[in-house]
Amino acid sequence: MSAASSSDPAIDLPPSLLFERRGPVGLLRLSRPQKRNAIDDVTIQGIEHFFSAMPDDIKAVVLHGEGEHFCAGLDLSELAESDIAGGIAHSRAWHRAFEHIEFGRVPVVAVLHGAVVGGGLELAAACHIRVAERSAYYALPEGSRGIFVGGGGSVRLPRLVGVSRVIDMMLTGRTYGAEEGAALGFSHYVVDAGAGLAKALELAERIAGNAPMTNFAAIHVLPHNAEQDRASGLLMESLMSAIAQGDPEAKRRLRDFLEKRAPKTVHR
Ligand code: 1HE
């Protein structure tokens, strides 16, 4: 991997990934527009490396794509010659990389535009918040390519939009646009063309200002509690809430509210 594309010496990335800092927010850009940001092996390794070696002072990440599309999914040229064992290793490499996103140290906000398809949709699903520009569309072309999702899509996508909808997308090639996709759960926000990065940065800056323990609890405890039995979930919640409130940062914020220095919770 070459360090030339990274503005941080600690993060050595391939040319298909660019890292930039905006204060406490790290921006990671898929930067292979000539191939519509299709993800090859080097890029998947770079994603895993980035999310496991991120500097401690980065408190939130924005993931976005260069060019007309967020991501055209797996680089199909790499799978064409792979045997069964190679296919399993390939899928497991994607799993490792995306687990580092979903269960990493900091929340990740994705900016979606144009094609968010196949492995690109799987990548988006591993992020915590998704901001879609109106050009975004979602598809699973795996069915027409004779393959199956391999980047965690069969696990994450049904949790976002339901199993039957994912079956329909894969069997019939059905696509969803940005507005419909937001209503179904593919994205949390829809914004105008070109406004996605600014919106994502605004959200990431807000997230970076949260108490680190709250961010940790939100991205680690909530998904696990959605999967485990009720009694274990409630116990985990009690433990996590006790840990969070015991942190000096929580005490400072509570005092700020009680002494009228903190903003009220209002609907804007
Ligand atoms: C690619 C890829 C790719 C583009 N792998 N090379 N994903 C797909 O099935 C989607 C395939 N891509 C497309 O349908 C289209 O490229 C797009 C709708 C995304 C964009 O169309 P367009 O007209 O802007 O670009 P293009 O002319 O199709 O592509 C530009 C170049 O990128 C071209 O290469 P060139 O050498 O001829 O210039 C394309 O071949 C190349 N390209 N997409 C390789 N995906 C972990 S399992 C995940 C399983 C999946 O992700 S399956 C879904 C794969």
Image (cartoon, rainbow, N blue to C red):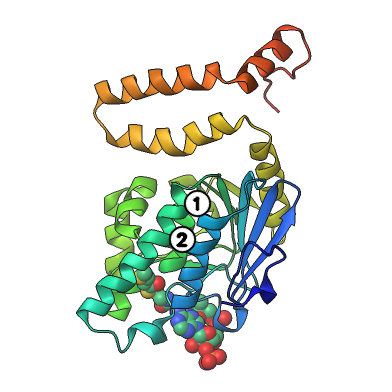
> Where residue 122 appears, x then y in whole percent?
41, 61
Say whether residue 182 is left or right of residue 149.
right
Say whether residue 23 is left or right of residue 150.
right
Say whether residue 226 is left or right of residue 209.
left
Judging by the rendered image, the residue that carries numbered circle 2 is: 123
User: In the current view of this chain or complex, which residue is farthest to the left?
Assistant: 84
For the residues labelled 1 and 2, say whether their Cβ atoms are less than 8 Å apart.
yes
Q: Residues within 10 Å of mark 1 (few under 14, many from 20)?
A: many
Q: Along the line of sight, which residue is nearer the eye, 268 or 50?
A: 50
Residue 141 seen? no
Residue at the image point whose x is 41% and y is 33% from the top:
221
Which element type, helix, strand or loop, lies under badge 2?
helix
Q: Can you tell which quarter of the image residue 212 is in? A: top right
User: In the current view of this chain or complex, which residue is farthest to the right?
Assistant: 261
- The quadrant of the image that shows the N terminus is bottom right
Q: Amino acid at mark 1?
A: Cys
Judging by the rendered image, the residue that carries numbered circle 1 is: 127
Q: Is residue 46 above or below residue 98?
A: below
> Where residue 40 appears, x then y in whole percent?
46, 78
Q: Amino acid at mark 2?
A: Leu
Which element type, helix, strand or loop, lies under badge 1?
loop
> Where residue 266 appears, x then y in whole percent?
69, 21
Q: Residues within 10 Å of mark 2 (few under 14, many from 20)?
A: many
